[in-house]
Amino acid sequence: MLNYGWFVVFCCFWLNVFQAGIAFCGGILLNTLAEEFQETRARVSLVSSVFCGVYLCTSPISDGLVRSFGLRNVCVLGCVIATTGFTVSIYSSTLNMMIFTQGVIGGFGIGLTYLPSIVAPNFYFNRQKAVAYGIGICGQGKE
């Protein structure tokens, strides 16, 4: 029988890919958003900056929620919040609305999924823990 842990590692890998992809690829749409909102590039970059700030500062909240409700529940809650924030940001008519919906709401949701995606593989492995953890975290691709 296949170990359920490898499915968790697979999901953590892809969750880390999406987290890092959203967080560190904000410059791709910078010029397009600057033209769309008739704003400077510096002001438009606040969307990604606020997102990264909220995303990385949410870990203490995520830790408290994980201790109370478990990894899976917090991860699902984070995905729902992030999806809501990103979906609403599609309909943003002003840059301030996009900063709030994508930066704050989306960042908070992704921040809730960050800790569970790093910690989850550790609970499913004894002998192959380092390999599982390495595969799960390599989705971020940070230096």
Image (cartoon, helix red, strand yellow):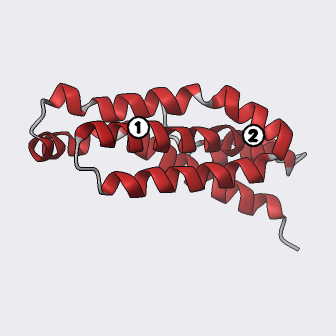
Looking at the picture, tell me which residue is in the foreground, 142 or 106: 106
Mark linked to residue 119: 2
Mark before the other along the chain sequence, 2 or 1:
1
Query: Is 90 positioned to the left or the right of 109 in the image?
Result: left
Residue holding disc 1 = 103
- The quadrant in which residue 48 appears is top left
Q: Nearer the viewer, mark 2 or mark 1?
A: 1
Q: Mark 2: give few (<14), some (14-19) or many (20+) Cα within 10 Å.
A: some
Amino acid found under the numbered disc labelled 2? Val
- The quadrant in which residue 60 appears is top right
Residue 133 placed where, x, y %? 72, 43
Residue at 49% over, 33% down: 142
Looking at the picture, tell me which residue is in the foreground, 127 or 116: 116
Looking at the picture, tell me which residue is in the foreground, 23 or 5: 23
Amino acid found under the numbered disc labelled 1? Gly
Where disc 1 sits, the SS reads: helix
Residue at 73% over, 63% down: 7
Query: Is 7 positioned to the left or the right of 52 in the image?
Result: right
Q: Residue furthest bottom?
A: 1
Residue at 77% over, 32% down: 64
Query: Is 117 positioned to the left or the right of 38 in the image?
Result: right
Residue 50 placed where, x, y %? 40, 29
Q: Mark 1: give few (<14), some (14-19) or many (20+) Cα within 10 Å.
A: many
Residue 119 placed where, x, y %? 75, 40
